[in-house]
Amino acid sequence: MSMEPHDPPAFTAGDALVEARGHEEARFKKQAWSGAFREFLEQKLYVDPARYTRTAYQLVVDMLDHYGTEGFEDAGETLTRRRLFDDPFNDGHNRIFGLDRTIGRLVKYLRAAAREEGKERIFVLHGPVGTAKTSLLDLLARGLEEYTGLPEGDVLTFRWVFPKNFDQIGATMGFVPQAREFSDQDIAVSLPCQMRDNPLLLIPREPRRRLLTDLFARRYGRGENHRIVPRKVLDGDLCYNCRQIYDALHARFQGDFEQIVRFTRVERFVMSSTLGVGVAKVLPEGNIEAGVAPITIDENYRFIMNLISSLNLVRFAGPYARANRGIIHYSDIYKKQVVYLQHLLSAVEEHKISWGDITSDIDVLIVGTTNAPEYEAMRKNPTSKALRSRSRKIDVPYLLNYRDEMKIYDRGLAEARRRITVTPHCTELAALFAVLTRLEKTMLHRDSDLDHDTRAAVETIAALDKTLLYGGEWPEEMDLDTRAHLTKEVLRRLRNEFPTEGMDGVPTRILQNLFADLCEAEDGRAVHPFELFDGFERVISQGPVNYDFLAHEEDEGYHDFEGFARLLRKRYDQTLAREVRDSVVEVDPAELERRIKEYLAHVSAHNRQEKVTDPVTGARVDPDEQKMRAVEERLAVPDDKRKQWRFDLIGRASQHLRAGQPIDLRAVYKDLFDALFHGIYEDKKKAINWSGIRGALEKCETADALEKEPGPVARQSLRLAKNLVARHGYDYGSARRNLLYFIKKNLDG
């Protein structure tokens, strides 16, 4: 009896409730902790002193380390990618592409501040519009939100709790056993520390210092595991409200510290931008960032009236109250006048914030974003010197690796692709155009420490060559000698030659808008490179009045914006020609690979002066010089370079083996595959009736119509179109359009 497949059972409302309940119960158990002050010391501090003395800087660094790293190669150097910025929270929807150098600098400065290796700074991400500065800081904040909900991200504060019979508790109660704590039913008034101070600040400074220095010395010693006790924890003080309550209890219980902390509950908190806990953003509008208001007294306060009657408790307002122990983000920080940023000086220098007549200690990481015009305006302000000296500017350029730029456009087009065809190579061409506009002409060939041949090789690097090298690929036209001199060290120096490279050029948003316009076109046609080229020309035609980058003067092929558009049209023509060639040739990939292996076997034997085995007779024979030359002629290898070429060819595989990399023949010997493939194409294209194919395609706008056409020309046309669709990702409409363009260009000249 056959078994019919069954659909899975429906996910009912009851199932949803059960799953939600289980999720929230697990979250509560994981995140909720509260206890008496002694429990905090014994169960938390003494178990992991470093965790419970972390400053905001240390917390952020630990969070970044928690999400992990991976190394990768880029333009001749090994970089570190921090997985936090892959956006693990939204399936990568807000992933940051290509800013690993910038992020690396930021992390280096954060780590130095966490180790208290220098003065704290205001970190300002500076760059042109649309370089993901805000997105980067948003992910930093989101990481804190998630991390502080994990066991390793445990962050504690405290609240004051008072029982209903508080008025009857006096100094004579000092004999009450230490274990006696107030139950939840006893508590009538609960006052959280609005600044979420570290519970350790309840301990007076001198015993606090002795406790922590001894604890750290015993736990971490002086070796590589050595940790410092943060100065903010050693020297900090309670906030204005908590200090008043502490002092009132101190007087009431005649300095009995254990009695004072009986009225506290240490508790965990999880940061949240929605709730304004540990994360805050300051917009350019408005200039009041710290304020206070009287606390409203409700009826429960009657139980502690004899305590608070002499106190002036206030409610703290503003981003610093929300962000303390976490991160505060100033959006477009220098759009504010310098006079309204002066409070930042004491915030980073003295770790204090003024609330008018009240001053409180703070522990917060201050970060900001700014664009170039606002930054330059701030620099010209004579009163900004002190602010600049306490700021750390970190440049955030446009991307210079076109493959990373492509990912941004592909992400933006993901939804549009559900209803419209985006023809292959569109995002690649847009990314190449973007990077081309951002490059500076290299002067590396003037460096005297490079040898003559290397300088000559560097001098030949054109703008498109540099773009492709930054993207991790060799330009096809670049000869072997030039490639050999562009070592990893030379590529690294090339990539780091101009610190400001990428700070100008076409904004990514402009090209994103161009794609959006093409997707919204009323004719509903596929987005095609032909329309994209027209879009490039429209952008260029708007001139420097609209786009600053267009003010650059052309410099030997660099900043030649109209030339870039022409160059990419030519590149697309070459790409299209290869794809048509691929659609004409129907060859077994395994057969092509067999031919490559056979050629390599003859070359290897030639290099070693050995014989090869004849596959037919099994006899040992000399390498076939004619067979090797036939391949090398297709690659235009000169006779005087043939010997070196053959040694270098086998050396490619050896390099991969030494690096522990698997040998992918198609990747390592791409030029060989192309040469053999082109030879097959030259033989087969003679049998193609290009004029007939043009007529058939012009007549048939759909694949269905072409399938109904009789005759060998129609079948040949359909086969070409289907091969373009299957092998290169076109739809029929785009394949038809490309074939007609290719035929017209090649037949009509």
Image (cartoon, helix red, strand yellow):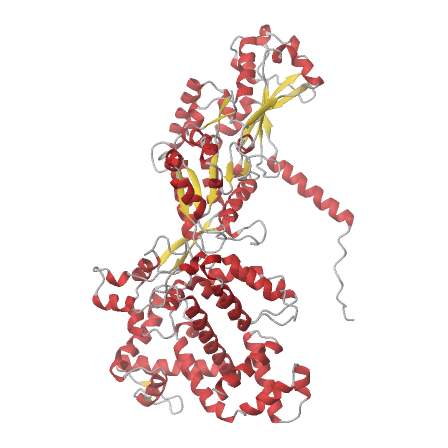
Write down the quadrant of residue 492 in the picture. Answer: bottom left
* Residue displayed at 38% across by 28% down: 217
Question: Which sits in the foreground, 330 or 239?
Answer: 330
Total marks in image: 0
* Residue displayed at 77% across by 48% down: 13
Q: Which percent across, then down, holds residue 10? A: 77, 56
Q: 573 above or below 34?
A: below
> Is residue 155 rendered to the left or right of residue 670?
right
Q: 625 above or below 391?
A: below
* Residue displayed at 53% across by 33% down: 287
Write down the quadrant of residue 401 in the picture. Answer: bottom left
Q: Which percent across, then down, holds residue 340? A: 48, 33
Q: Which percent across, then down, holds residue 124? A: 44, 42
Looking at the image, the residue that sits furthest to the top is 172
Q: 327 above or below 70?
A: above
Q: Is residue 490 visible?
A: yes
Q: Which percent across, then down, holds residue 206? A: 42, 18
Q: Is residue 107 visible?
A: no
Question: Which sits in the foreground, 662 or 71?
Answer: 71
Give the quarter of the figure containing the N terminus: bottom right
Question: Which sits in the foreground, 747 or 324?
Answer: 747
Q: 103 above or below 238?
A: below
